[in-house]
Amino acid sequence: MSLLDLGAAQRGIWNAQLLDPTSPYYVVGEVLELDGLAPGAHGESPVDLLAEAVRLTVDESETLRLHVTDTVDGPRQVVDDTPASRPEVRDLSGAPDPVLLAHAVVDAEKASCGERWRTMTDSDLHRYLILDLGSDDAGLRRVWCVQLYHHIIVDGYSAALLTRRTAAHYTELAGGRAARRTRFAPIAEVIEADLAYAATDKDADRAFWHDYLTPAPDTAGREDHVHGAGTTSITTTVRLSAGEMADLRSRAEDAGLVWSDLVMAAYGAWLRKFGFAGDEALLAMPMMARTSGPLRRTPAMLVNMLPLRFPVAGTDTLEQAAAAAHSALDEVRSHQRYPGSELARDLRGTGGPAVLHGIGLNLKTFDFSLDFNGTVGVLRNVAGGPPEDLVLVVTPAADGGVDLGFETDPVSVPAVTARQRLEDIRAFLTCSGPLADVRLRDAAFRASVAEARSGEPLPEVVPTLDDLIDRLGGRAVGASAWETADAPLLVSDDATIALTAAEVHGQVTELVAGLSGVGVEGSVIALDLPKGP
C-alpha cells in the first residue's frame, strides 16, 4: 500500500478540521429512504440484499477505503485493501414508533462520527448503518440506510454516485438487471490529475480570478449569515412540482437557456429586492471541479467553492438576468479547479474571503434517480456544513420536481421566515416584465402590515417636558388619575416607600433649585444617588 498525497480540496478540509477540531460540520451524508422493498426473486430478505449491495459498493470504491495518516511531510492517504464487511443492520420494527426512533439513531450516529473522526487519521472515514423499520400488511419493507462520511473523502456528487452504484448492485441481487462493470477510476489517478493541474494550469487560473475579482465586490455583512460550531439548524424546503418544472424548462429553452439559469436569476433578483445585493449578484457556489471523464465518474472529494458574479438590474426581465448568469457561469467553469482555499488566502486582508461565505447557491443538478429493482430510493440530506442562512440549495426530487431549500439558524431565521423567502423566490421564477415591478405581496397584505405598524395616532397637541413635570404636581387640566397630586407614582418593590406625583414633583423642583447657578451654562452635572424611588 503506497502513500498518496491529498488533493487540493482534501487539503482544504484537512486544514479546516484541524483549525476547529471540535466542529461536527465535516461529517456529511444522507439517509437513503426505501419504502416498499419486496423480497428478492428467490425470497431473500430485502434488508440482507441491501447490506450486500452496500458491501459491494464499498469494496469497489477506493475513496471509501481511504485511511489518512499524519507524517513528518504532512498528511498522506492510503487505500486499505482489506475486503469490505457488511454494514450493521439494526431492527427497529418492534419500537412503538420506529420512525421517531430512527431519527434519534441518525442524530446519535452523526454525533458519534463527529467525535470519532475529529483527527481524521487511522480509521475508516465512512459509516453505513441499515435501519429496518418493519413491514406493511403486504410484506413490503420500509428501510433506511444511513450514509455518513468525513468530507475529506467525499463530496455531494460522490454521495449520489455511490448511492446509484448501490442501487445497481441491489437490483442485480434482487433478480433484476445486471449491474454494469464499475467505471470508478483509482484514487491514485485522481491525485495524479490534481498534481498535474497544479503544475500546469494553476497560475493562469490564479491570474483569471485576480482579474475577475477586480474591482473587489461589496462583501459587507455577508459573514453575518454564517454560524459556527454548536449552532442548531433547521432545513426548510418548498417543492416546485413536476408541472412547474416542465413550464420552467420550456421557458428556459425558448430563451436558449437551461432551467437552472432562471433559478440563479430569480435568486439574484430576490437578493436585490430585499437589500442583500445591489445591481450585482455575488454568489458563493460549489463547483464540481471534474473536468475529465474519469473524474466525473469517480467518487472522491473534489468539490470546490468559488464566487460567481453577474448583473441583475431592476429593468431586466428574468430571462435577461438569466442570460447574464449563464454567461458568467460559462466564464468561470473553465477556471473551476483553482482551489477556493487558495483564493481565500490570495484575498486575505481585503475582506475578500467573504466572497466564499454567507450568500450562495448550491445547484445539485446531477441525476438523483435511484431505482432499487422497482422501488424508488429517496436521498435526504442529514449532515452538512454549518448553517449559512442565505445559501439556497436546489435539489431534484424523485417525482420530477425540484426542492428549493434553506438551512438556517432558527434564532436568526425561523422556519416561517425561510419559507416566505422560498415562496418569494418561486414568485420570481414565474414573473414577467421588469424585475423591479414584481410585487411579492398583494394589496390587502401590504395594507394590513401598514395598519399593524401605524400604532395609535399622535395627539394634536404634544406636551413639552415642562408640561409633563407640571402634571406631576397636578397642575395640568384634564390630567389622568395617576397624574393627580395625591396618586402614587413611584412605589418600591416591598411597598415600604411610596411617592405621590406631588412628592416627586416637589423633589424635582427642589433639585432644580439646588442646581441653579452651579457651574457655567452647558456644564455636565453628575448625580451620585442610590437607585430607588
Image (cartoon, helix red, strand yellow):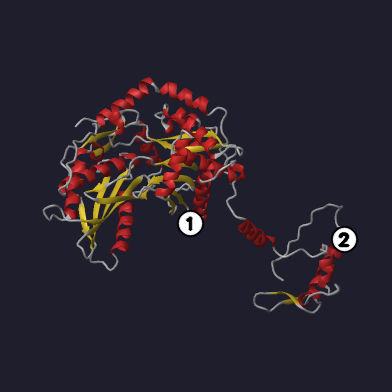
Q: Position of residue 73 (x, y in %)?
A: 31, 29
Q: Position of residue 122 (x, y in %)?
A: 25, 41
Figure quadrant of the C terminus: bottom right
Tell me how far mark 2 sits from mark 1, CA to CA. Answer: 58 Å
Q: Is residue 397 visible?
A: yes
Any mark on residue 415, and which? 1
- Kindly identify the residue that appears in the image at 17 percent across and 37 percent down: 81
Query: Which residue type carries mark 1?
Result: Ala
Any mark on residue 516, and which? 2
- Front-lying residue, 40 or 208: 40
Query: Which residue type carries mark 2?
Result: Ser
In this image, 437 relative to 390: left or right?
Answer: right
- Front-lying residue, 231 or 448: 448
The crowd level at tag 2 (other Cα within 10 Å; few <14, some 14-19, many 20+) is few
Q: How many marks?
A: 2
Q: Position of residue 473 (x, y in %)?
A: 83, 73
In this image, 189 relative to 466: left or right?
Answer: left
- Kindly identify the residue that appears in the image at 31 percent across and 55 percent down: 106
